[in-house]
Image (cartoon, rainbow, N blue to C red):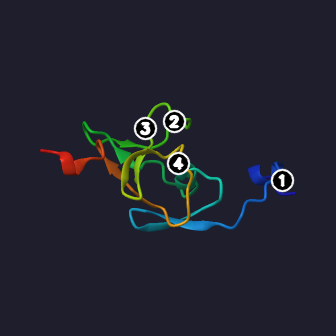
Amino acid sequence: MARTPAGLVRAEPGPPFEITLDGRTLTALPGQSIAAALWGAGILAWRTTREGGRPRGAFCGIGQCYDCLATVNGQPNRRACLVPARPGDAITTQEGHGHAELSV
């Protein structure tokens, strides 16, 4: 038996599917959150802060801190650690509060 997390628990996930981050194609597995899929692809940041534009990604992983906000399929401020990845999801890096069209 393989010494991987999936192998240790005898998990048999369905076939991988594609999602995109800023147009870049990534692979996700059924049951993964968007944050987990991004982590699996080596991506650690997908948002910038309102003040200073500092990079952010997942911090707490349980939906409490809001550091992992992303724009998913055109909807800003989605917590990537809580949103299940779905085939064809289009994630875009969120800048600031995610509502640039409302800025004055």
- What amino acid is found at the position of numbered circle 2 in the picture? Gly
CB under 8 Å between discs 2 and 1: no
Check disc 4 and give the amino acid type: Val
Q: Which residue matches tag 2?
A: 63
| Of the two numbered discs 4 and 1 in the rendering, the one whose residue sits closer to the viewer | 4
100 relative position to 77: left or right = left
For disc 2, the neighbor class at 10 Å (few under 14, some 14 to 19, many from 20) is some
Q: CA distance from mark 4 to mark 1?
A: 24 Å
Q: CA distance from mark 3 to mark 1?
A: 32 Å
In the figure, is residue 96 to the left or right of 62? left
Q: Is residue 54 rendered to the left or right of residue 85? A: left
> Looking at the image, do the residues carrying marks 4 and 1 touch, with CB atoms under 8 Å apart?
no
Residue 83: assigned label? 4
Q: Among all residues in the image, which is located at the extreme left?
A: 104
For discs 3 and 4, the disc positioned in front in the rendered view? 4
Instruction: Give, as a three-letter code, the residue at label 3.
Output: Asp
Question: Residue 67 bears which disc, if any?
Answer: 3
Question: Where the C terminus falls, by quadrant?
Answer: top left
The Cα atoms of the two marked residues, 3 and 4, are separated by 14 Å
Badge 3 marks a residue whose secondary structure is: loop
Mark 1, residue position: 10
Residue 54 percent coordinates (x, y): 32, 41
* Residue 30 % position (x, y): 65, 58
Distance between the alpha carbons at the discs numbered 3 and 2: 9 Å
Which image quarter: residue 24? bottom left
Give the residue displayed 57% in from the left and 50% down from the top.
33
Circle 1 crowding by C-alpha within 10 Å: few under 14, some 14–19, many from 20:
few
